[in-house]
Image (cartoon, rainbow, N blue to C red):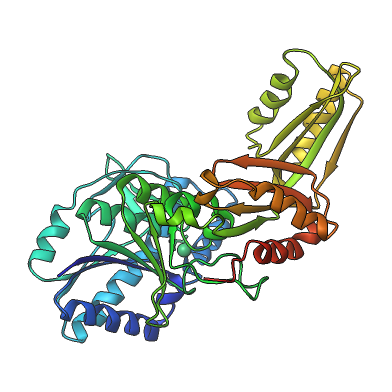
Amino acid sequence: MALIVQKYGGTSVGDLDRIRSVAHRVSKIYSAGNDVVVVLSAMAGVTDGLIQLARTITNDPKKQELDVLLATGEQTTVSLFCIMLESMGYPSKSLLGYQAEIVTDRAFGHARILDIKANRIKDLISKRKIVAVAGFQGRDAKGNITTLGRGGSDTSAVALAAALKADVCEIYTDVDGVYTTDPNICKRARKLDRISYDEMLEMASLGAKILQIRAVEFAKKFNVPIHVRSSFNEEEGTMVVEEDKDMERLVVSGISYSKDDARITLAGVPDRPGIASLIFTSISEAGIVVDMIIQNTRKSGLTDLTFTVPKNDYQTAMSIQKEIAHAIGAEEVLGDEHIAKVSVIGVGMRSHSGVAAKMFSTLANENINIMMISTSEIKISCVIEEKYTELAVRVLHNAFGLHEA
Ligand code: ASP
Ligand code: MG
């Protein structure tokens, strides 16, 4: 028999009927002889509602108190869940983050898990109780309540699975699994049976909606297999696991896209040491994270520098760059908010060539201009005009045969 950690997201526990069906699902697995630890999110919309409530008082509520407030969302669901299970005749016990001894740092609002002493949970399991742990929360060394950042229940679940050495961590959500691309824009998108941790991390722009990035990093570090699946049916979902030889046979496993960035170009920059450092130090001092960077050299001792920043930071970044351009005597600063980044991802790229060429020619056939290119070991990204995003995703999905199993 297995030890299974299951996590149910906000929509899966959105009302009492849904909590009842989660209780049914859990009770079946328990009755088959397995030990089950259930991690729950707050009911859908509750965390947002609590944040709004605090913001009615002030725009900048004290982070530490906000965490105390937000933790009540998960407290509600674990208690209701155990009341439900007990009423159905199953022995259970709810634990809040601090009771489960989930110890974090003091970064209120986005705390990191440092340690989990799973003794109390193990003890309850040995007494054949179904244990329900409040997701998204822990405590710091002094016992203050902390939260792990939005979507943090995923990380709670994976961390508990690692601490308990569970056989699997099942993440129940409102989608069937991880797809080759966004099914909303590509009808031929296909559910993947398996994906590696690294690919899942690269698919962040799709995957973040399904799994908190930190949860995947945690799973990779402790080698916890994650099963992403729907709480509304019995279908198998997607296994997120360690990479194996088999996975390399597939050159590309997914296409992701993001419309979250904007592009800035400094044209006619004097080509001498220290300039790039000046430009990017000023950006980072403003707390802005740069994603892609390209620099080319002109014959005349001048260079052009292009980079991308989050759309939210675009205005700030532009005004900083205008000042710098003036100071260093650059010709002009150009900006473009209407861009998108489209990426092809696959561990098979480590051993296969020709992926970049195929990507570029596929986009060229549709007359889509590539503005920037960046690569990692398992990903190639192109920046294109935003209006072509959906088209690009569809033609690339086709070109790499992702609709075929
Ligand atoms: N309730 C929290 C949120 O909405 C944590 C979670 O659902 O994972 O972000
Ligand atoms: Mg989530």
Rendering coords of residue 153 (x, y %): 39, 59
Residue 67 visible somewhere in the drawing? no
Residue 178 visible somewhere in the drawing? yes
Q: Identify the image quadrant of the N terminus.
A: bottom left
* Nearer to the camera, 173 or 256: 256
Vertical side of 321 occupied by 163: above or below: below
Query: What residue is drawn where x is 81% and y is 34%?
Result: 319
Rendering coords of residue 342 (x, y %): 68, 54
Side of 168 where 204 appears, left or right: right
Rendering coords of residue 42 (x, y %): 41, 67
Query: What residue is drawn where x is 63% and y is 37%?
Result: 289
Query: What residue is drawn where x is 40% and y is 51%?
Result: 243
Side of 126 where 146 appears, left or right: right
Query: What residue is drawn where x is 31% and y is 54%?
Result: 224
In this view, the residue farthest toward the top is 273
Rendering coords of residue 89 (x, y %): 16, 85
